[in-house]
Structure formats: structure tokens, C-alpha cells
Amino acid sequence: MKRREFILSTALISLSKTLNSKELEQYDINSWLILEEVLEILFPKTNTMPSSKEFLAIKYLKEVTSHYSFDKEDKKLLFQGSLDFYDAFPKFLVSNKKEKEDFVKRANRSSYGQEWINILIYYGIEAMLSDPIYGGNKDEIAWKSLNHETGKPQPKQKYAKVI
Amino acid sequence: MMKYDICIIGSGAGAGPIAFELTKAGKKVVILEKGAIYNEKDFSKDEIAFVRRNIITPNLEDEYHTIEEDIDGVWTKFPTYETGWSFWNGNILGGSSNLMSGYFHRLKPNDFKLKTVYGDYKGANIVDWPISYEELEPFYTKVEKEVGVSGRVTKYKHQEPRSEKNYAYPALEVHPITKLFDKACEKLDFTSYEVPRAIISKSKEHRNACYYSNYCGSYPCSSGAKGSSRASLLVSSLKTGNLTIKANSFVYKLDSTKNRVTKAYYYTKEGNKKELEAKLFVVAAQAVESSRLLLNSKNNYHPKGLANSSGQLGRNMIFTGGGIGSGEFDLSNLTKDELFTQGLFVNRALKDWYFTKEFKGGTVDFLFEHANPIKRANSLRYDKNGNLLFGKALQDKIYENFTSKRVLNFEIFTDWMPNDNCFVSVDEKYKDKYGVPVANIRIGAHEQNVKVGDFLAKKAMKVLVQMGAKNIDVNISPLPSANLQAGGCRFGNDPKTSVLNKYCQSHDLRNLFVTDGSFMPTGGSVPHTWTIYANSFRVAEFIKTIF
């Protein structure tokens, strides 16, 4: 069964204005940069695993968040959360790696911040381990790192479109 | 307007045998299927499309159910668009039979007469079936041949009588871990039951044999080996030239006179209203939706809904009770090559306690954790104390989990005790995007479900311990299985207490049949699919004699 793994809680960080649906569609490039840098803290390169930049997490998110099947509440939280995070930590983008990790840890102490980080991890894992046809898991990099043998055939079309 | 002989609503396990038999008999049959037509070349092992998004099921914001749960003594409705707990199962040609794992178990003679064998359970509405195992046995055998069942018959104390010595297809290949399982069972004096599967091990006509993709349950089959209604029955039915399939057709109402159903009304994908006439109607939309359709079809002749003079329509819904458990295996148990062998099945179960002297027991199926990497990795994002992991700790945990161990799961199936608080109803307050009242599902569970689940879990855990598993875990739950639905249109001999007669024909409207799992008064302690297929073949034989 599929219970929702994600429940919105009250905002603790939020100081920024609330995005309306049109603004969500026009989400600006700086905000994608915030998401990209936070994802790199959540999924850093290790001896065994690729980083979020290596498995192209942002390319994946741009692809799937524009599809009708993407959960609308999750989408709202992803984008609104990044604005709120930037409001709370305006120096984030110009900080070094250690400082960025500290900002993410501080955000994780609030319930709203943790909900946002949780949803980033949830979709970051999708980016890492989905079929490359969706834009992430570049050249099956994460599957190879995990010795994961995917099922065959792999999709020729996204979202089970009838061939 | 073209008038068909038979109109079938739905195309899954309850529908396929009717189309297969009646088209061969020369009847003009039309299937109205809510979803699209797919075939093998359209299927892939795409976790995003088939598991993580609502692509082959409706978007819950458009079409949902309400789930009625007991919250501190008050029955409270939760729309599934709020919870994400979908009760849709495969809106494509062939329905949810495309997505099943195909663990096929027959019912046993005493499953047909639980009340006679065990008497009344307080708070449960147990009744005997109006037919016996002996009446259904030839059709179980027919399913083995036509749908395709592979395996090896296990001799044990509860083995049901069989008219054929062997299954129609040889057993599928199994994983080396079965050696540990068999050995553990021998040590414990348990029977290692070899589970038959609705997956063919040899090619059959247009269907290729299983190729051990490692992505089986929840995914449609790319070789046609899995015995979906689509692959095993509908393709052959189409070749007769007597079958018309109208895809993307959502039937929202049946019209009737006092004695006969006359028309089906449906929406096309574009939202256009259409109607269709037939001489005989077969409803097989999966149990929840079948009850919903008949309740929503009320008219002046049938003010409580079609086939509902008894007031029993929608009542006594059943699912399967039980829960799940797991244990981890690593290189201390098997060699690396053995442990990480991919694709081969476990196909083992415990059924020694299917019946006990004191109470009806059940089945425990064993299977590897699904290969789905996204689901597996997402289950790892918390530490033991429930704290969210990220950074190197998360990456290391994912790596460790994928490369050093495998998880063997078990699934427990107990009889879901039918009771007054488990039913389908409709409520004008909750409507889908078409303006049609959605199904409300009250999911009250009888305490016996959990008691039997706990009893069987202890047996399963003993096997895992004996096998050398680590981190053994179990979760027995009173929640229903959304994908295994039955009941709501009980069959029986008394029109005052049942919706259908013993041939799954409405007591009230003689040209109306219901052939999905809705007819079942009790469901057995197994997945229902084999019984649904067999019963639908049985009903098809009856329809041939009257039509």
C-alpha cells in the first residue's frame, strides 16, 4: 500500500512570500541553484557513491516536476522551501562546503526545514536510481556504483506511453 | 446502435474467461475497459512509471475513494487524494492481473464451508458457499492450462484434491536461498511448500516463457509469461473476430427495466457520454468499483441500486488479513554469487497451519525484497532512532544495504473476516471529476485477522531464525490489502441474504452477472486471483447453457 510519506507541517522558517501556481511554473534559475547546492550536501560524493551533481539530480527534477503526475503539494514544498531556505540563510550560496553543511543541519532542526530536506532526499533518491531516460542517474552511474542490475527491457518512452 | 450479445465491464481476471469462452462460442462480446490498451512491447521495468506515479491508475485528485476509518470510536471518511492511499489497481487492458505477482493458491474443500467447520465467530458474518470445492475443481484445472500455472505439487496434510497429477507447466527456477529454507523446514519439521505461479516456464502460442527479469510483481510482463487476463485470454479472444474492446471507457451507470439490464452508460477519455446496448451484462470492474457501479445505477425499479433487493450490495467486503515480515542475509549465509543471483524466485511458503483444530489459519509466502531500487533506498533514509539521515551517512547506508545483504520477506495471508463494518457505499457528498459519487470503503477489521497473523508470524520467524537471518522484523496489521479486494456481491441460494445466485447471476435481474471477486462470501487465506479466474470460467459455462 502507498501511504503518503510526507506531511506538511507549520512553517517555522518561512519569511518569504508564498509562491502562486504561475510563479511556481516560472521558478527562476537562482532557486534551482539553491536546490542544486543543497542536494550536493545531501548527496555528496563518497568513495563508493556518486554526488548529486554527478547523477544530475537537477536535470531530473526539472524533468519530472513539469509532468502532470508529479505531486502538486510536493512540488509546492520543494520550491517554496528553497525560497524560505534562502531567506533564512542568505549567505548559503557564497559559503564553503563546511558552512553549507552547517546551514543544512540548522534547517534540519526545524520541523518545516526537516520536511523540506526530507522531500529533497525523497526525490534526490529518485534522481539517483531511476532510469536515465528521466534525466538523472547519468549513464546508470548510481546503479553501477551499487552493482544494481536493472530489469529489462528498460523504458523507451517516459511514463509508460504506449508505443 | 450496434447491439452486442454480451457487454463486459472490466477486463481483468473476472472478465477474461467470460470473453474467452463466449467469443469462442460465437457470441458478439464487447469489453468496456476504463484504461488504455497496452501490449508486451509497451511494457518496461520503469519504476517511476509503473510503481511511483499514477500513470496506469487514475490521478487521485480526479478520481478517488473515501476510506472510512475508526478514529476514537467515530467512523471518519478520508478522501484518498489527501492520504495517497490508492485503491485503484491497474486501469489497463487486463486490469490488475497484469501487475500481480501470480502467487497462485487454490482454495481447499473446507474453505467452502467455514461456518460448518468452525461455527460462528462473534462479530463476523461467516457463511458457507453455495458451491463445493468439487464443483470448482475442473475450472481450477482449466486455469492451470489456459492461464498457465507452473510448479511442483507439494504433498502435505492440507493438500486439496486434484484431477491432474501435475501442474500444466514445470516449476520455475529458484534461488539458492531455497536450500536454506528447505533445510530449516526439515529441521523444524515444517513442510516447505513449493508455491505454484501464474507464470509459464515454457512458451505458449503468442506468449514467451519467463525470462527472470527480477522485476515481476507490480510490473506488467514484457514476455507474456505472466498469466494476465490480457496475455492469456483476451489476445486469443480477439482472434475469433467476435470481441470488440472499447478502451478508455469508464462505465458509470447501468440502465434497467424491472427485470433486465438494458444499457451501459460510459464516459470516453475526452469526457463524452456514450451508451451501449447488449442482451447480457457482466460486471467485473474489481470488487470495490463493481459495488460502486451497481449502487450508482439505482432507478425507479431498483431504488437501492441494481441487484440490491436484499440490501446486501456492497456489504461484507473482504480483503486479505495478515502482515509482513523480513530477515537479512549476508555472506555468512551464502556465497557472494549465490546471494546476489538475480531474477530467480523463492517460491516457498508455509501452509501447515492453513487449518488448525481451533481456528482457521493461513498461508505465509516467502519472497525476496522487491528489486525496486528507489523504494529500497528511500526506506533507508532514517536511522534507528528515527532521525533523518543525509550526507555521507545516507550514502554509506545505501551502499552497504545494496552491496552486502539481501532481505527475505514474508507475507502472511489470513481470511479477512467479513463483518458489518467492512463495506462499500456511495455518498453524494463525494464525487469524481465526472460528477459520479465515488466509492466509500469502510475498512473495519475483525480482531481474529490480527490474532491469526501473529500466530503465523511466529512460525515464519522460526524459519528465518533457523536459516540464520539477521535483523528479523515483523509487522502484523489490521489494515486491508488495497490490491486484493473481494466481496460486496455475495453469492448464495437465498435472495433475501445474497446479491447473486450460485452462478453469480443477479437474483433480481436475470441478464446481469458479476464475475470479479465480488461474489466471494469468504476469501480463503490466500490471494484470490486463481479462484476468480476459475469461477469466471465456471460462470461462462453456465451462460453458454442459458444463452
Image (tube, coloured by chain):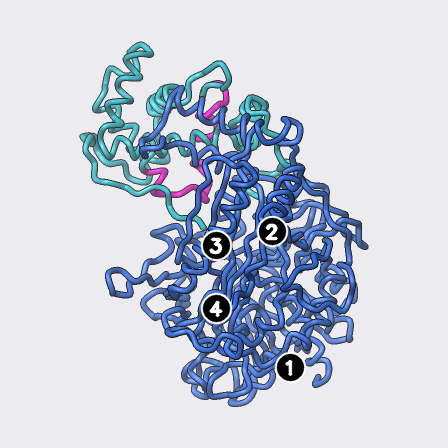
Chain colours: A cyan, B blue
Mark found first going from the N terminus, 2 or 1: 2
Mark 4, secondary structure of its residue: loop
Kindly identify the amino acid type of the residue bearing the numbered disc 4: Glu
Mark found first going from the N terminus, 2 or 4: 2
Q: Which residue is mark 1?
A: B279
Circles 2 and 4: CB distance less than 8 Å? no
Q: Is residue A78 magenta?
A: no
Is B222 drawn above or below residue B526 in the view shown?
above
Task: Magenta stretch: give its range.
Answer: A54-76
Q: Do we see residue B534 in this rendering?
A: yes
Q: Which mark is residue B58?
A: 3
Circles 2 and 1: CB distance less than 8 Å? no
CA gap between label 2 and label 4 equals 21 Å
Is B546 drawn above or below residue B253 in the view shown?
below
> Residue B144 location in percent, x, y?
73, 61
Q: Residue at x 43, y 59 (%)?
A: B480
Q: Foreground mark, 1 or 4?
A: 4
Nearer to the camera, B260 or B180: B180
